[in-house]
Image (spheres, rainbow, N blue to C red):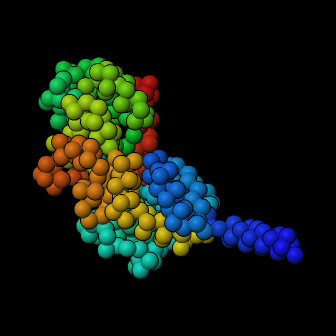
Amino acid sequence: MRLKATLATLLAATILSTASMAQAETLRLLTWGSYAPDELVKKFEAENPDIKVEVTFSNNEEMIAKLRATGGAGFDLAQPSHDRIYAAQLEYDIYKALDLSKINTDAMEKSLLDGVKANTTIDGGVYAVPHQWGTSGLMADKSKAPDLKSWSDLCDPKYKGKTSMRLKRTILLGTAFAMGHDPFAAYSDLDKYQSILDEVVDKLIVCKDNIKAYWKGGDDLSAMMLSGEIVGSETWDSTAYKLYAENPNIVFVPPTTGALAWIDTFAIPRKGKADDAAYKWINFVLQPENVTIMSGSTGAIAAVKGGLDLLPADKKAAVNASFTPADIDNLKFFANIPPGVEDMEGKALEKIKASTGG
């Protein structure tokens, strides 16, 4: 009888375990590399044993392409930058409005929350909230290039063969600002914007002889900076912060015209199947102890109150070595991208690549 009871108990436990596994929900996360560190994924799954996190790393262009191809299916939470939501939603209808009552927005930095809401509100619905923010600008080895402060300095003959850049839209925008234009203001007049792009293309083609190599990822850029092959480059601030820990002469330099600022967000795809799990993940990564882990992985600042203070110590030191309050006030936040602009920028970049072999 005891053996039968034991077998019955084991059978019942197996049935319950199998039923629990069958009921487990999968949170399909479409995000940037480093935005779902293993430590946090395991911690979230431990706190939510009924949810399994499935991560796909991507970038803005790929996120939109994947969701456009499926009409907003295949993922439950996406993390596009704040300027890539409004037009994509109007054109492709790939997201659903958020239920803000399910998100701990009180934890978020009000100015960043308000800015993202303003950029992503359509017909009264809010389609995104902020997660992490950072900037694109310049990186310099101050022991070798103490005067590198402008986007145009990457093309200064005194640094010939010692600078780098990435052939993406950021360098187009930065160069436009350095030439005295406001590319974001020109978005409302695409003919004017095209004329700005034409000037920028000419400038960057002439600049090709100054460039040691065009970087394509953070690893190759880091290798060139640490080896001394280059003394300055266009970069993400997070890459510069990581290198600062290895060589304090390498710092992020906000350009004189202002660093370009981005905010990566949380947005829920239109045909997502795990909304409740998505909201749980959002609130989970807003918790202070998890903010520090996340920022240690991304190198970016969380869009929460006191986000700078929640950075790991080495990242905080790097930020303080790079930014003054005036630099923060001078940030140029990416504007919403109107339909057609990305095609224009893509053609401009192709012209530069054709000339440079980049």
Res 199 seen here: no
Of residues 258 and 51, the one nearer the viewer is 51
| Residue in the picture at 86% in, 73% down | 4
Residue at the outermost front position? 2
Specify whether 2 is left or right of 117.
right
Query: Camera-side residue: 190 or 233?
Result: 233
Q: What's the residue at 12%, 51% (across, down)?
A: 326
Q: Residue at x 60, y 68 (%)?
A: 50
Location of residue 100 with respect to 346 vertically, above or below: below
Q: Is residue 331 above or below residue 244?
A: below
Residue 133 drawn above or below residue 2: above
| Quarter of the image where one finds residue 314 | top left
Residue 213 falls in image quadrant: top left
Q: Quadrant of the N terminus?
A: bottom right
Of 330 and 355, which appears nearest the observer? Answer: 330
Give percent across and percent down for residue 184. 28, 54
